[in-house]
Image (cartoon, rainbow, N blue to C red):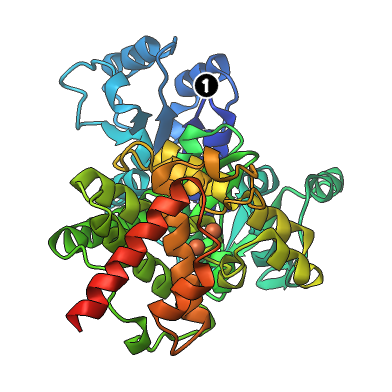
Amino acid sequence: MAEDNTQVLLYSFDEKMRKILKFALQSGYGFDVHCPEDEKSALSLFREKKDQFNLVIYLYHHEDFILDDIIKIFQDESFVIPIGFIADKELLPGLPPEMRGRVFHFIEKTNTIAGLQEVVSKIFVEDVSLSLDTYSPVALDCIEIFDGLSNDLYIKLKEDKFVKLFREGDQLDDQDIEKYQKKGLEFFYIQQKTVKWVLDQVHSQFPLFLQNKKFKFVVRSPESSAQEKFEQKIIRVEDELLITKDFKELIEQKVKRAVSTVKKHPKFTKSFRKLNFDQGKDNYISGHISLLASTTCGLAKSLEWSSDITLEKLVYASLLHDITLFHKPELARIQTVKELEKTWDNWSEEDRKLFLGHPADAGNLVKSSFNLAPPETELIIFQHHERPDASGFPKKLGASRVAPLSALFIVAHDIVDYFINNEGCGLSEYLLRAENLWNVGPFKTVYKGLKKLVDQENKAS
Ligand SMILES: [Fe+2]
Ligand SMILES: [Fe+2]
């Protein structure tokens, strides 16, 4: 690397944080990054070679032993090399006031990527950002913290000559990396325009990365399919599902709006005949969930179950019950295990697993991440594919073990499904078809409520 490159001393006790910081500094700005692995070597680098560095990035933790020593070095020698100091907000140590702002720049840990950018632009008066067609190095040991970066990596043949490492769809695994390391390769290369969108995605997934030790940043290019992009919003880490803050907030906004609408007009959609429901693949989910919200709440009103909290539960459940299938609307259309079996060969093993697991996945996600959802919302979601004859899934519960509100939801879901698939049919046709379907346990009560509603509407018209 060029001798006149900006030299950065990066100390992070946490290996994964070290890798992502190294990526941001090395690949994002083309800086030379030096990473001592333990406190002792960090301290000796601070002492002995401090003049060689232009910037220090330092991840603090509460059992830090070197902070006092570092402060001393800085105080004794009126040291002027800026330090980007990353820490949890509540762990920010007390620093001598004269040092705050002079050389120390605080970066809150959850905001590491944006904070780092801010500090770099504050410190370097000249714009240090690289032009978009530049290739920057990516250290081989940083690759493992990403899922989906392999397609964007290059190998440098000679000055200004780079070739793509893999073809589209090829995956780089740990053994490949090891193979290249054994050959003595230190870096792959990455285009600067790629680094930009990778860092944007890293920023939005950063709180999830801090939350889960096994987390990998899911990075997808702007050209990726909608399905691939969806994989960045709800991220599966072994058995746990994590949702990005942006996506969660977007959903919460939609729920809030839907809740206020149904509270004002908790009305069962009078006639589905008028609804020209677009069966197009991409519209299935949004059409399905908004119809479901009005159907569940209208039905609750007719049963006189429409307290605010019940309506909130039903709206949350309507909008979130298939959340882990949002990227696969064709799977969300399947209602029963029988229907899945009929089209069994159309699906991959992964699709079938995703479908059969979605009531539990979505329920668990609501429980762990949507703390504004009222209690019991997740129960409705867990049970939304159960059937009165115990042929449902995942638990084959049968009528006596399904909660009343779940029964309401299941019936409403069936109604919506019926109208989507039987254009031009009305509720009277549905009632005839469903008479024997919902004649047991809590389903019977819901069916009576539905019948009452239809009778009232027929009289009124
Ligand atoms: Fe579902
Ligand atoms: Fe559904």
Q: Position of residue 375 (x, y in %)?
A: 34, 36
Horizontal side, residue 337 vs residue 274: left or right = right
Where disc 1 sits, the SS reads: helix
| Residue displayed at 39% across by 46% down | 405
Q: Tell me the crowding category of disc 1: few under 14, some 14 to 19, or many 20 or more residues within 10 angstroms, Cα based.
A: many
Q: Position of residue 399 (x, y in %)?
A: 55, 45
Horizontal side, residue 298 vs residue 446: left or right = left
* Camera-side residue of 33 and 299: 299
Q: Position of residue 380 (x, y in %)?
A: 44, 46
Q: Amino acid at mark 1?
A: Ala
- From where the camera sits, is residue 207 visible? no
Considering every residue shown, the one lying at the far left of the view is 264
User: What residue sits right under mark 1 in the picture?
Assistant: 42
Quarter of the image containing the C terminus?
Answer: bottom left
Instruction: State whether residue 373 is above or below residue 42.
Output: below
* Camera-side residue of 204 and 318: 318
| Residue displayed at 32% across by 15% down | 71
| Residue displayed at 30% across by 52% down | 121
| Residue displayed at 76% across by 59% down | 171
Instruction: State whether residue 64 is above or below residue 271.
Output: above
